[in-house]
Image: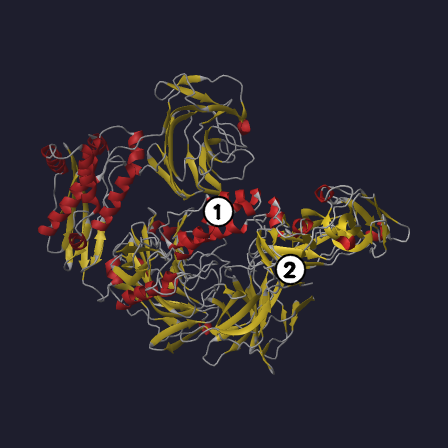
Amino acid sequence: MKYRKVFSGLLAGVMVASTVLAAPTTAYSASLEEEYEEEELLLEDDSNLLSDEEEESEEELELENPDEEDTEAAGFYEEDSLDLEDGIQAYSAGEEAQPVKTFSFEGDLDGSTMKAQKRAAYSGSAEYAEGYSGQGIVLGNYGLELNQLNLGETHTVSFWVKRTAAMGNFSSLVFMGSPVGATENWVSVAGEENDGSHLRVWSNGDGFSWSAGITGVELPQDEWTMVTISQDAKNLDFYMNGELAGTMQAARSLVGESNDICIGVNNWDPLFKGVVDEIQIYDQALTADEVYSLYDTRSPEEILGEKEITVADSISIYEKDTANINLKLPAGVTAADAEISYTATDPEIVQISEDGIVTGLKAGTTTITTTVTIGSVTKTGSTSVEVKEPVNAEGVVASYSMEGAEEGVLKDTSGFGNDAAIVNPDGVQFIQDGDRDVMEITDTASYVTIPMGVYEDLSDKEAFTIEAKYSRSAGSGSASWLFNIGSNVKGTGDNYLFYCPSFSSGAIRSGIKNSSTEYLFSTVSTQTPEQYYTVDMVFDHGKVSLYVDGIEIGKALNTNFSMEDIVKAGTSGDILGFIGKSCWSADTNFLGKVDSYKVYNRARTAADIQGSDPAYQTGLQEKLESAVSDAVVLGPKNESFDQVLYNLTLPTALDDLTIAWTTTDETAVDTKGNVYNSSEDKTVTLTATVTTGTLTASKEFEVTVKQLDLTELNQLLAQVEALDTTLYTEESVAEMNQILETVNTDVKTQSEVDTAIDTVKKAISKLVYKENYEDPWEIIEANAPKEDAKYEIGDTETLFSVPEEVKDAVLVSYASDNETVAVYENGVVKALANGTAIVTVTVEAKSDGFKMEYSTCVTVGEKPQEPEGPTEEEFRQMMPSVDAEVLEDDSVKVTWEKIEGANSYRIYRKEAGGSFTGLMTVGSDVLEFTDDTAVPGTVYYYTVKGFWEADAKGSATKYPTDVMVRVTAGTQEEFQDVMPEVMAKVNSNKSVTVSWKKVPDAMSYRIYRKTAGTAFKGLANVNAGTTSYVDQTAADGVTYYYTVKGFWEENAQGAATKYPSDVKVTIPVDYLKTPVVSTRSINYCTVDVNWTGVTGAQKYVIYRKEAKVGTTFKSIGTVSADTLTYRDATAKMGVSYYYTVKAYAGSVASGYQKTVRGMAVPSSPGLSASGSTKGVTVTWTGSKAGANSFADGYRVFRRTANTSWKTIATVGKDVRSYTDTTGVKGGNYYYTVRAYVKQSDGTTLWGTYNSAGVKGAKK
């Protein structure tokens, strides 16, 4: 099984490490073959107990859990750990990496697609020729799209190619990236410009701009060559015939649904001409050994027999220092393949670990022989070693005193004499800052040069550590390096190692670059100006590590760079590097204080660095305490840890470090902060832990998770269950039920309970009463009992019964004021004795509780004589024929036909949407009535009822309800000039009631709504007589404008009125977002505070506090919701404040930011410039530093169109102009001026400045 050899080899390294610990020796030898056999035997002996999968798991477990104590003692396991990770990454479950696709081209395209130049369609046939193995495909008339889309960030492409003609300019051998027409994001291996035989690797997009990271790689003609590209994220390695040809940073070109791999063709350039064979595509980045094994399939023994090993020729170290033998095995041979031993001629002088690390024991010289054996092949190498007595106890080759300089020179206290020169010493001062003696760089023209002797005195030129303690001034530039190796300053810097405390984004920026490729630490760590930090930058044979205050920053950079190469190409003038200066000419120099600067003669380990200062542990604990403060963890909804109902906020990152959480009860609170409420309170302990190297910090929280509170939810569900849904419209009931179906009643957390409550409330709010239920009175009135009735003793009559259509909308009760004469029950009156009684029915509307009483005067006596004609019952079924017309004087004439049996008539009128009201009672001989009270602009309905008795008493006929007339108030043109009076209010359920006053002549209305900046859109149409509408669709926190238009015709047709546009309401909110705040200094006492608007806010309150411990935020102003800026005119110059803003909407308040700084500084001077033959004279206005004082001085800057600002002069407080005589005649320059104030603590406060500047030219 293949996995056994791979993992056995890796395990052998671990087992040997333990052997070294048990019995240290200077002559190390171990047979890996014996280890393999032992491991195989172990697996076979246990085969009756473990399956193959279990064996793999057991082996992996051993790899992932090494003995930490032994690891540290051995001093070499850290490097082995990296090898193990690489091995695990290279093999999945112990197996060799397998391609996801292979193209062999044995007379078949194997799923690829032929493409003409620029990836156009190609209709010809494929051509095949003799390949590297079997057949290959001939390219030149076409290239290939491999149809391997979206492989991701990690991949490898490898193939054999034989170039048959010179390559055209940028002719693409391999193209990986976006399709034609898409945003460019690609990596290409292509021909060089005007060079038909060499390749370049270049990239565009994803932060790169046609960047050629690898150039000048020869591709022979008419020879088979293996080309391999291996990429992991932005790290790309390029191989030719299995050997590394170059490394670079490149775009992640195969991330994207349409991004593909092309061979011999790209989106623009000439086609490649040649034969290609055996293309292999992997979805992982192959290691160097794996790439070489694709090229050379021979055994490691065969390769070692042909090639040589290399070791360091000589090593010079100090006692207790270490160096690396630097054994390099031939490509295709790994340490796991070979038996490696190291032997010293004098083991009392040096000790050698099994991985070639040499430690000086005592002064003297010796020779180390390195022996590598595979099978019958043995190769050796010899290294002469000199061990010297240490120069100092710290093991440093440079350490500078910051107590002062001697004639502009920093003295080296290490004993090596590597003194450092200060450039422009006038811009540097040496002061005491608390208990520190520091060098303060106050001028951007000043910096320190580090001599080449520092590098030359290193025992191992590829292993050292730079340590510096410093504080960065707030005025330091956004690309100001603290230190670097590399002294060739130019427009585009290269060949350097550097550390910048704060780049343009505010985060640390640090890394290494050779002539073409730069590796940068990926970090979000930021630093506070004027605060001291300690940085350790470790270089160890191509691996770069970074620590700040003992905390590792990002991940180590595995670059394979040689420091010797970087120093050789990147330095000049016997200067190794700088303190306070960059290798990029446009970068400004560092401003701040340097407490110490040291270069260690070794690559310090994490344990060495982190154990050197107890403050590192304290600092890590304090950072964790701040990151997981009580307020942060409780979140916005929990009040205290003993009353936790809702999810907790558990931060998972502390800058670049991971915060790990544990919990004592996953069923109550899990490690993501999710809270699960049960039927009882539970107490849980949460622990946050952060670890970096040997430093660990933790914080515990004792949390009481309260039991699930279902009271309100159960009450609401009971309310829903008890609803009489027949009272509501079918549509609203259906909408309610649809929402209720989404309610999760199987709740496990209080958040789920709250969501269920909100959903049930929302569902109930959708209910709309049926029209008759909400206003039953028109129907009740039409069926009201008669006002008088006469009976004989014993008579009964039903005076009133609730109409069927409103029977569920009202409550009814009956009463008699004289029950000896008549009783009144269930609408039936019964005559009992002679006399009179008033019987009353009381009707109460369920919708709003409104009551109406209808009384009938009952007289009991002798039976009245039967009238001639229809019976009384027949009379009640009659329906009068009624007509109405509008007369010229706007009165209305109502006429009706005579009704047999009627002894009187009553005329009624109502407006649209209203109820009929009696106008007049007339005798039986009157058949018309003129209503002179009609109001122009109104729609009326008229009707007439006939009555059995005089004065509209007794039984009544039925009556028509559709006799309508319209009394116009004016013409249509006049109607169109009417402006309705509209109101809107927000209801308790957040619906909006829109109401308006009746518009004369309107037959219908249309209601509209909009938000600010948009156009009105119609919501609904209503008929005349309706003067309100309820909008149920309004959203929380939104301000709406409502309006209404009257229409001349029904259904919102015909001419329309005007409409108001200023009727607005704001829907209240339950939550407000946190405003995002920024500040800008205006002058010495004024700071502008700006923030982002918050939907639903009614006002904003601005707060301020000094940016120091022990202060609290205090309100300094309140503004309306429409205002997003506030000017603080009470700021003290030079004082650093924190500003914040909270949004309010009633009792609801937003969160607030806590660390937005602002400072009042002198204002930007007003500028003007004029040119003369002498030069350019810049004139400016004074910048105030107080009500009656000006700044202490001004600094004048100049730049050209494509450069950054450079200081050209510093002048006193009373100077208001400066003439620049150094410019080139006719050259266009830009000038700006910046004021400064010397503060009482000795620091310099810089004002704002005009970043555009003014233009001037010397004539």
Q: Nearer the viewer, residue 1176 or 356?
A: 356
Residue 1218 pos. (x, y %): 63, 72
Query: Which residue type carries mark 1?
Result: Gly
Residue 486 seen in this snapshot:
no
Instruction: Give the alpha-carbon distance from disc 1 to disc 2, as whole Å.
Output: 98 Å
Q: Which sits earlier in the primary sequence, circle 1 or circle 2?
A: 1
Query: Which residue type carries mark 2?
Result: Ala
Give the secondary structure at mark 1: loop
Residue 723 seen in this snapshot:
yes
Residue 909 pos. (x, y %): 77, 52
Q: Which mark is residue 837?
A: 2
Residue 50 position (above or below residue 140): below
Residue at point 46% right, 32% down? 260
Residue position marked by numbered label 1 in the rendering: 207
Q: As drawn, which residue projects farthest toward the right?
A: 888
Quadrant of residue 787 in the image? Answer: bottom right
